[in-house]
Amino acid sequence: MNIEKRNALVEKLNSEPEPQLVPVDEFFDGNDDIGSIGCNLPEHPGIDAFRTALARLKERDDVVAVYAQIAEIDPGEDCWPFADTVFVVGWLSSEDLAAELEALEPDEVGSAEDFGVPEQLLHKHKEPVLAAWWD
């Protein structure tokens, strides 16, 4: 883990109102902490699997942006901020999103309205928003 990047991200997130959102490329920059996302999976596929799948998703023509919602900013000195939800902005279906993320085993995938769309997404994007959640 890159401690300087972790500390900079924690400082940035602490200055933002809840719920804190961060673009996935920023969330994964310097992050190798498997406890930062999908930590309750019986067999965690590794942080690189999450990074690769979400980066691939972000490159789709029907996806505008992908954000990690931070559930815990500072879970410990040697820990990266923890995210349990990913929001995907764009026109893909929830079935397509579930298929894209199948190897990451999210507990739920669906309309972000079911998860509560953060206000900052509604103000920033006019496109539909989907969510994937890991318990």
Image: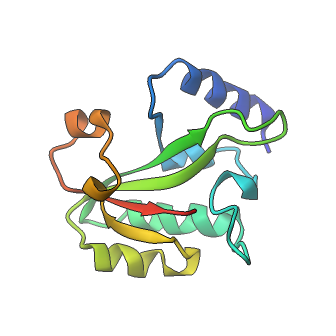
For the N terminus, give its image quadrant. top right
Looking at the rendering, which quadrant does residue 109 occupy? bottom left
The structure residue drawn at horizontal position 45% and vertical position 67%, both measured from the top left corner, is 56
The correct choice, above or below, for 116 with respect to 5 in the image is: below
- Residue 94, compared with residue 131, is above or below; it is below
Give coordinates of residue 19: x percent, y percent: 44, 34
Which one is nearer the viewer's eye here, 60 or 71? 71
Residue extending farthest to the top is 15
Residue at 71% across, 72% down:
44
Applied colour scheme: rainbow
- On the image, the x and y values in percent for residue 68 come to 49, 48
Q: Residue at point 50% right, 49% down?
A: 24
Could you say which is closer to the camera, residue 21 or residue 65? 21
Relative horizontal placement of residue 50, taking residue 114 as reference (left or right): right
Q: Residue furthest right?
A: 78
Question: Image check: 45 left or right of 60?
Answer: right
How far from the left and from the top, in percent, is residue 125? 21, 42
In the image: residue 72, left or right of residue 111: right
Count of numbered circles in the view: 0
Q: Quadrant of the C terminus?
A: bottom right
Front residue of 62/98: it is 98
Looking at the image, which residue is at 66% across and 40% down? 81
Residue that lies at the very extreme toward the left in this rendered image: 126
